[in-house]
Every structure is written in C-alpha cells, then in structure tokens.
Image (cartoon, coloured by chain):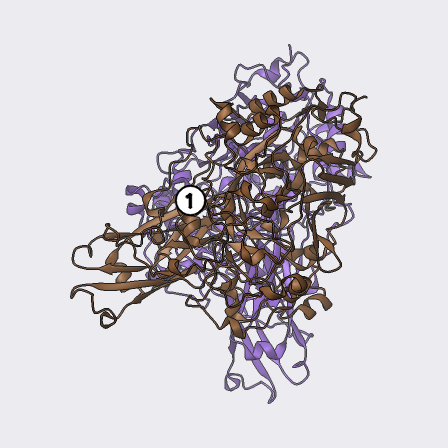
Chain colours: A purple, B brown
Amino acid sequence: MKFQKSKTLSLGRLATLSTIKENLRVKTSFQKSESPSAQVLDNSNGHSNGGDSDSILLFSAISGYKEKTPRYAPPPEHFSISETDSPRRPSSALSGSTDARASSFNGQHIAADETFSSSAEYRDYDGPVMLREPAVDGREADEDSNGEVGLQRGEIISTSRDFEEEEELWQFPPKVSGLGLDRRDLATDDKWVPRHPDLIRIKGFHPFNGEPPLSTLMHFGFLTPTSLHFVRNHGAVPQAGWESWTIEITGLMTKPKKFTMRDLLCFPSRRLPVTLMCSGNRSKELSKGGKSLGLKWGPGAVSTSVWGGARLCDVLQHCGVLMPKKRGVQYFVCCSGADKLAPSSSSYGTSIPLEVAMDESRDVLLAYEQNGDLLTPDHGFPVRLIVPGFTGGRSVKWLNKIEISAEQSDSYYHLHDNRMLPSQVQDLDTAISEGWMSRPEFVINEMNVNSVICTPAHSQTLTIDPSNEDAAYSITGYAYSGTGKKIGRVEVSLDGGKTWKFCSVGYPAQPTKHGMYWSWCFWETRVDVMELVESSEIVVRAWDSAMNTQPENSSWNLLGNMNNCWYRVKIHRDDPADDPDAGQDERTISFEHPTQPGMLNGGWLQTSQASEPESERELTLKLMHQESSSNLDLGDQLPSTPRLL
Amino acid sequence: MKFQKSKTLSLGRLATLSTIKENLRVKTSFQKSESPSAQVLDNSNGHSNGGDSDSILLFSAISGYKEKTPRYAPPPEHFSISETDSPRRPSSALSGSTDARASSFNGQHIAADETFSSSAEYRDYDGPVMLREPAVDGREADEDSNGEVGLQRGEIISTSRDFEEEEELWQFPPKVSGLGLDRRDLATDDKWVPRHPDLIRIKGFHPFNGEPPLSTLMHFGFLTPTSLHFVRNHGAVPQAGWESWTIEITGLMTKPKKFTMRDLLCFPSRRLPVTLMCSGNRSKELSKGGKSLGLKWGPGAVSTSVWGGARLCDVLQHCGVLMPKKRGVQYFVCCSGADKLAPSSSSYGTSIPLEVAMDESRDVLLAYEQNGDLLTPDHGFPVRLIVPGFTGGRSVKWLNKIEISAEQSDSYYHLHDNRMLPSQVQDLDTAISEGWMSRPEFVINEMNVNSVICTPAHSQTLTIDPSNEDAAYSITGYAYSGTGKKIGRVEVSLDGGKTWKFCSVGYPAQPTKHGMYWSWCFWETRVDVMELVESSEIVVRAWDSAMNTQPENSSWNLLGNMNNCWYRVKIHRDDPADDPDAGQDERTISFEHPTQPGMLNGGWLQTSQASEPESERELTLKLMHQESSSNLDLGDQLPSTPRLL
C-alpha cells in the first residue's frame, strides 16, 4: 500500500502504538503518571471499562492531569458563593445572606451521588479510546475509507506548520458529584443520558436544554465542570460508539474520505480553553419587548472548557481541500450531526466560512476531548466541532459529516436558527415569506461584547449596621467577546449610566500566539457599602479592544438572539418594619437580577410567562417529542436550584 | 558582491531597469498606455517635472490608469450632492435646496486653479520616481545601507508567498481642481505645501488639520480624491526627497538595514483600498459633555484611497525579524516620522503589535502610492505606514525609522494621543499622575463600528406641496468598522430609536481573500416624505457582523476619541410665516446635523466654542508654532465651504 503525500502535509512513517503514545505525550505535554497502575484502577471518571493495558495507559495519558501544578489559582474568595451551602448566618459582616431557595429542591433526581460510570444505561457509549495496533497489511484500516487511498490507522500525521506554541498545562476543573439519570428524562429517548441536577431546565419538555445557575458558574470560575456546562440540544442525544463512528469529509477537495476516531487521533492534537456561548444567552431579557421565538435563557448559557482535538485545517488540508480562486467567492464548511430532528428527520446542520476553518489563527477543532476526558453524550460524544468565538450553534455535536461547498448549509436549523433578524421582522411568516431568514447578513457567527453581574447574586441581601457601613463591597462578574479581541475594559455605574467606575479585569488565559482571546474574563470593582444603599441599580458594560461596547437597551429580535444590553441589577431597600428581629441601626438591601432562567420566576423584568403563547418554532420541536414525552410537560415543576457541590 | 538569501525570501537576479518595469507591470497589472508620449507630456498630476524617458515611462506605468474600465459605477444619483454646484432650483421635486453658504467662501485661497506642479515652492519634493540603472558595481547602492550587506538596488525581491489574489483594476478618484498654496499657510513652515481650499481647517493655527465637508466627501463616494482626503498633522510637513530618503529598520532582527525608496520598489507591491479614520472623527459631538482635549472634528475625518506599496511583513522578513518565543509576550513595531515636533523636537512616533505587522491578512503596507500617484506632502511623501482598520494615527507619515522592540513606542505622541481613557479620568494631570495614560488597554488600534447620515445634509431644506407629498425621500450615509468585519446592517429610526428601518447597504469593495473589509460602505433607505414631516429626528446606527452596534449616547473621554454614538439629524418644521413667497399648500422642513467641523458654527449640539478654554495639549502645539504663526490665529475667519469642483 502506498501513501499519498498531499501538498502541505507530509505523511509520517508507520508508527507502532508505543510510538503513537510517545508522540502524543510529547506533542501535548502529557506526562505519564508516577503510578500508572493506580490510574488503571481509577475508573472514577467513568470512561474506563477495561481493555488491554496499552489502551488504558493511553487513556490515562489523555485524562490523567491531576498531578499537575495548578496553572490558575483557586477562585478568589468573592467568587465563592455561600448562599446554598451555608444557610447559617455568615460570619463576615458583608457576606450576603439569601432566601432559602435551596430548600425548594424537589428531589426529582434519582442518583445524585452516582458517578458517571456506574449507570448501566450507557449502552453504546463505549468508553475509552481503544487504540490497538493497526492491522499489519493495512487492509482493516481502509475498509471504511470511502474507496480512497487515505490515512493509515495508527499513523502519525505531521504538518508543515510549527507547533512552537508552548502548550499550557491546563488545570482542569473539578469533577462535581451529582451526575446521574433524571426522572424527567425517563420517558424520553434521553433516558440513558446522565445529567447534573443543578442544570436549570429551560423548558419542561424535551429536547434537553439547560444552563447552570449563575452563582454556580461563577463559583467555579474560569473553567466550568463538564457536567455543569450549559447544554443546547435540538433533539434526543444520539447513542454513539467510539469504534464505529465515522466522519465523512467530502465536497470541494481532491481526496474525500471517511475518518474514524482512530484516524483523528493520528493528527497532532491542539488543546485550548474556549468559551462557548449560546446566541440566546440572556434571551429571556428580550421577551418583555415582545413575543420572541427561541428559548428563554438566563445569563448562564455560557461556559468554558479546555477542548482538545485535531485542527480542522490539518484534516481538510489532508483531504486536499480546494480554496476559491476568485476574490469575493466564499466556500463553506457544511457540518452535520447524527441527531435526528424534526422536520423530516433531518440532522442538525450548519456551516462556517471555509476561510475561517482554514485560518490557523482561528483554532477550529474537531474536538474529542473536553477538560481532559472524552466528550460526554450531551456535549457531542465522540466528536464535535469547536469554533472559538462563534456562537455555540456552529460547534456541531455528534459530528458525522463535513461537506465543503460553494453554498451555505441548507439544513433547516442553519436557515432558521442562530440569526439576528432586524427588529422590523415581527413574525416567522414574514421572516420566511419575505426572505429575511435566508439573508446572509443576519447569520450569527462571532459573538458580540457582553458582560454580566454575578455578585451580588439574585435575591442576595446585605445587612448594613454601624459596624460595617464604612466597608467596601465587591461587585464581580464575567465579560466576553467572541471576536477574539481582548475585553479592553469593564465599567460599572451606580447612577444609571451617568458616571462609570472602571473595574479591574482578570484574564485567566493568555492570548494565543496569534493574539486571540478565546475565553471569558472576570471583573471586579469595590464600592462603599453606603454607595449601594444610596443607589437603585448596578449597571455593567464591557468594551472590546476596538472600543465597541454594549448598547444601553436591548434590541428585540424575532429569534431572541444576541442580547448584550447593559446588565442591570436593581437594589431594593427593605422596609425595617418587615423584619421585627432587625436591630435599630440595621438596614437591609436586597438585589434583583433582570430575570431567572427558563421557567424560573423572579427578576425585575418578569412578565407573566404563563400568558405567553408557545412560539411556533418551539411548538415544532415540542410536536416532535410529544409522543414520547407528553407526560413530561413539567411546566409547574420547581426546577433545581444551586446546591452544595 | 554576494546576495544573502534570507530564510523565507529568495532574492531574485539582478534586474535591469526594463526588467523592473516589466515586472512591475506584471505584478501590479499595470498596462502601458496606448500612447505613452501623450502621458509623458501630461503633467497635470503635478509630479512630472521631466527626466529621462525610462523614468517617465515607469512613472506613467504607476500613474496612468485612466484608460481602465471602471470597476465601480459612478455614485448613484442620490449620492450626487447638488446643493453647492447648482444653486438653481432643482428640477426634481425632492432634491434639497440649501442655504447659500457657498457664497461665504472668503477668497483667501491664492491659486485655486493652479495645478499641483506649477508652484515654484516645491523645493526638495522632487517629483516622480527617478529610477535609474543601478551603479554597475553596486557601490552606490550600498552607500546608505548601514554597513550591512543588503539589498541591491534595482533588484526584484520575490517572496515565498503566493500572490494569487486577483489584483483589482481600481478606478481611481478624479483629480479635483483647486489645489494650490493658501495664504493661511504663508507665514508658516508649510508655506510650500499645496492644499485644497475646500478642506475645512479644524483650528485657525498650525499644524494643519483639515477634513472635507461631508457633502463633498459623499459626492465622490467610495474613493476620496487625494487632495480632499482628511489631513491630521502634528507639526510642519517635512521637506523630503525621493532619492535621498531612507528608512532605517532595526531592533529585534538578524539583519537591520537602511532602505532607500528604490529598495522598497524592489519588493512586490500590494495595492488595495483602505479607509483611514481619525480616532477623533466626530469628536466635536463629545465636547458638549465636558471639556475634552483634542481637535474638534466633524464626521469627515475619514477618507478612502487606493494605497500601494511594499508589504511590511515582506520587508521585515527580509530583515530577519525575530518573533517572540513565549506565549503572552508581545513585540512591537515602533515607527517614527521625519516631522520635528514639540516637546523637545521629537518625531511623531507610535507602535503596532508585531503580530499584526506580520499577519498577512492584515495588509500592513509601507505605502509610497496613493490613488495611483506618489504620495503628496500632506499624506507622507515619500513613504508612510498604512495599517488597515487601525486608527489613522498608527499610519505614520514621512516614515524614516522602524524599530522592532519588546516595548511599545515611547514617543510622546504614542503615549499621549490615540487613547480612549475611562470617563472618570477628567483631566490631563490625573491621567498622567495616576498612570491612566500609559495603560495598554486604552490604546486605540482598531476602530469601532460607526455610521453617519450624509443626506439630508446639514441646513438642507425640503419643500413639500401636494405634488410631492406622496413621494419617497432617500436617506443615505456611510458606515465603517475598523475590525475588518463587514458592516452587517444599518438601521434608521424616525422615532428616536423605538422602531428601526432596515437599510440597503452597498459594499464598493469585495473583501480581501482573507475575508477582510478594509473600507467603508454606503447605505440608503427610502422613507415617505410625510414620515419626515411628522418626525423630529433621523437617527442611524450600524452593526458589524459580530452584532456589535453603536451606543445610543456618546461616552465622554478626556482625549475626545472614538465617538460612535447614534448619529442624529434633527428635523425642523419651518414656520410658513417666515417665507412670504411660500405657496399656500407648501410646507418646508429643514435638517440640522449635530455639529459642524472645527470652528464652523452650527449644529444642534452647538455650544459656545469661544468660551471653551484652549486645551492643554493644543496649547503645547500652539506654543510650538507661535513664533512663525502668531499672526495666524484666524479664530474669526470664515473657513472654506463646499464649492463647485
């Protein structure tokens, strides 16, 4: 068998498994554990279900980073949210006390302390990377390869590009307890999918869409635990197998090919922290302005993981991808997943410009790793696209087909989702019949600049007495821009935007060598307690390095996307008469965020969610699932709330 | 003599002049004129003052594009501003009539019809490219070369990069009559510099800073005639010679070198349209909010030219530039010009990140050509930097030194200009003493998203009678974002931002092959005349493709930079009693922009400019020039206004 040498990729020599592992270790700065046998026995990550020692060793090389020196310090104290795990009166005078929402946890969760691996429901989700020696004659290697002479399994692909960039030794986020099956999923096709009960379900019916409570998200800081990462599904989670999975790569290229997961592992891996944000993050704030389609997300449809995988540009180059020859002509990378969706059992599909995929500085990945583990079912196991900076909706999960085309994706979901229509388009009929929906200028790719106040939290209260009225209070939050630009500044106003306080901003991740900021940052400013007492509102706005900032008011749009108006937390002065226990010199103020996610009540922007008719698009999705989940429209349930982790 | 071969540049063979010309023609799609002799005699562009026929031929190759098929159609009719060149009543019912400001032109201009070349004041500004055969033994070629074995004059440098991108045959803007010397410059060091009288002088004293009237700018559309391009000078224009000019390139590189203009011509040329905008564009709108330093620009501190020159990345690669090895470490390209400025006779200097300079997709040029001609004195003859998307302040004029450094430029002007400080920094003393001025996050590089209404023009009136009250009126303007991102949408509101009309947007230039939009675009929306009558204000806002938009209100900042709030044109209903000639059924409305540039009166935001104290920074500049221009503080002059061109 002969290997073809593509124009820019030089195929390496046929490697043995040990070479592969060695190479993986070197290329990604993996270090073999001091006591590999301990790691072999440690299956608490849930993926290890046995296998030969070589494959386990490799797997431990992929997942065993726990010994590394932390790159990031633990979150500062003010990010530590005590409201749920310490109902006792805080000893620090200025720690907030909150309402007792934690007690409303409704106990619907079956196995809060089960680990990910102990469920018998995993079926075809078959665990660790089972890299075996390639068949000696290479025949097995090519049986899925679409008839093209292609990649030899087990071969290391090297590219002409330098990997001079120092790989950071990322300190992954902790694994949180509580993952397990959920009663709310049992009558659905997702009944086998483990989920964390703290994810707030945006709707009472399926598909599953959830975001972590803002305080939980901030508790973990820079990197979000995988099981608490927000989830945006469009249908039931596909049941996938690592060994049997293929990605067909086809279209405008000289060597189309079907890749297995083993093939992908042969490409040099790239690992970097990336913030994913849903286009609909903060969409619930828009619903007051008028009926909008789309889910009612709070400000937690954003999370950050260290994603790892092959670079899409390397894989496409290997396939001999063709670039447009004429200026102004665009090609597209059309991706689709294995989920079967309404209408007409199509897959979720979307596209990104080819120039983005091929631009090394954009770091587009075929990711098979999240926070040092293989992907989980909700996040696209075994492989998904990761497009840094773009809306999460472009990072196709359960990816099984890539087609390079001169046209955008024609998937229903590409054409009808992740768009920001002008405000004059008031309903879906108009959007479609007048052609608004298909205009390229409304496609959401890069995310705009955004920031959110995390402390004070919603419903948090603050009691001021003579002992602390000279103290300072720390206002904190996150900020993010999807353009790869640094958040240049964050400002807080206590007078509705008349004057602004300049905040200190911490950037947990360095920019990439191309100067890109692919993840969020955290800001803080300290104010005198008495300033809060005298103010009626805390407002935040961020600026990116091009001095683009957030608009004062939201721009309603039909699909409810891209809301990045100033985030406002109202301050209420509680009437002392309401609290007979309050001391004579005590004053209490409380804080109210604009909304609470999904069906949760609360927030100064709250409108009667019950009176809002179901949107058309949601009805479509609902119809699709009504048979299996008609008894699951849990509109009256009490969703889960932040819990002690 | 031996040529060194750098790592990524392969030095070509020693070329004769005819080879150079042939090569230039091929590389840049130059075509020899059908009748070269006619071009030799045509010196109306003002640069040709004789020379051997070879040099003239080459010059005609550089400047003679007039025969090319226009790439862009003439501006559409609604961009054609008739107010100044046709004072007669417009035949079209809805063309605006204006006040008679044209008649206020004060006649201070000496030689409005003199051509650029006819002035005897040019001194050392020595005309066309005088490329001669290199000295046979190469000694002359190296006499300025800093002792390094370097580039052989007349040699063609080729790079390893493909120039596959189709060069556009740009249709250059027309040359407008009127260029000449100006009485206001006669007692200054700029007395030899030809200028167009229509540029509105922002201050009555030197250095020269001028912007074209908005209506003139829009009249020419996509490409601004060179003599009407806005000018931002910090001191007197250096008197430069093409032959004697050198750029010293030094710092973190293996082969520092002094380049002559001939050397630069040896690099492949790149030519593309780039919009330059001053950080202070629209700064006069900020002065109402509080005293701000900086010039009081109107919305015309923006212009677009086709710039041509060598790519900075090629030149730096040729010098063996070193890149930082560690992530998070930045190097800078520190550039300075030949202008001698206060304080302490330093030059204007600034820096850009090295990663930007070396990023092929950013198209940073060492430009020696504007709109097909050599540069003019006011725009940096013989060579300047062009950094697409960045504030004009980074595009250093009269460039004579580049140093690659691990530090930003320490030039006074880098540290004190082109920054956007937080609004809490209220005065220069605080800015400096508290270290605000030197913080890197306030450096302005890329420009934010901006848009301006051009028609209706300031002071334009519109008479509505029964014959036209059903007609439509076309509102137009420009929009720009400096991030290379496409302007995704432009919206106009007639009700103060409650509802928005989606505008059509025209993009005269295709994106580059890297998908970059380096130049402005034009937008239009048609409204019913009666909608205007019933409205009190036209508001515009633009969005870039990442859905970043303009803020509703401006953010005052000490240096008066980066104002991109919604642009608002007020609508006034004139009292019929004021016009006894008005017909019974006629109604007249008039339009008022927020400001007029510089010292011009007018605009609904107008405050008493006279009562504003001189800013400290401007005083510095003024002091520097007071000796030569003490009789030139023409605060009470009537600046020039749009004229028939």
Q: Quadrant of the C terminus of chain A?
A: bottom right
The type of residue carrying mark 1 is Gly
| Disc 1 crowd, CA 10 A, few/some/many (<14, 14-19, 20+) | many
Specify whether residue B193 is in view.
yes
Considering every residue shown, the one lying at the far bottom of the view is A584
Residue assigned mark 1? B221
Between B380 and A540, the one lying in front of the other is B380
Vertical order, A33 against A599 (above or below): above
Q: Specify whether residue A204 is in view.
A: no
Residue B46 position by quadrant:
top right
Q: Is residue B49 above or below residue A477?
A: above
Q: Position of residue A110 (x, y in %)?
A: 54, 52
Q: Please provide percent x and percent y for residue A121.
A: 54, 39
Image coordinates of residue A509 in percent, x first then y, are 68, 49
Q: Chain of mark 1?
A: B
Is A172 positioned to the left or the right of B195 in the image? right
**Is B224 situated above or below A316?**
below
Q: Secondary structure at mark 1?
A: loop
Quarter of the view holding residue A472: bottom right
Q: Is residue A8 above or below residue B89?
A: above
Residue at image coords 66%, 61%: B628
* For residue B164, side relative to residue B433 (left or right): left
**Horizontal side of residue B11 vs B224, given as left or right:** right
Q: Position of residue B239 (x, y in %)?
A: 67, 46
List the single residue furthest toward the right: B147
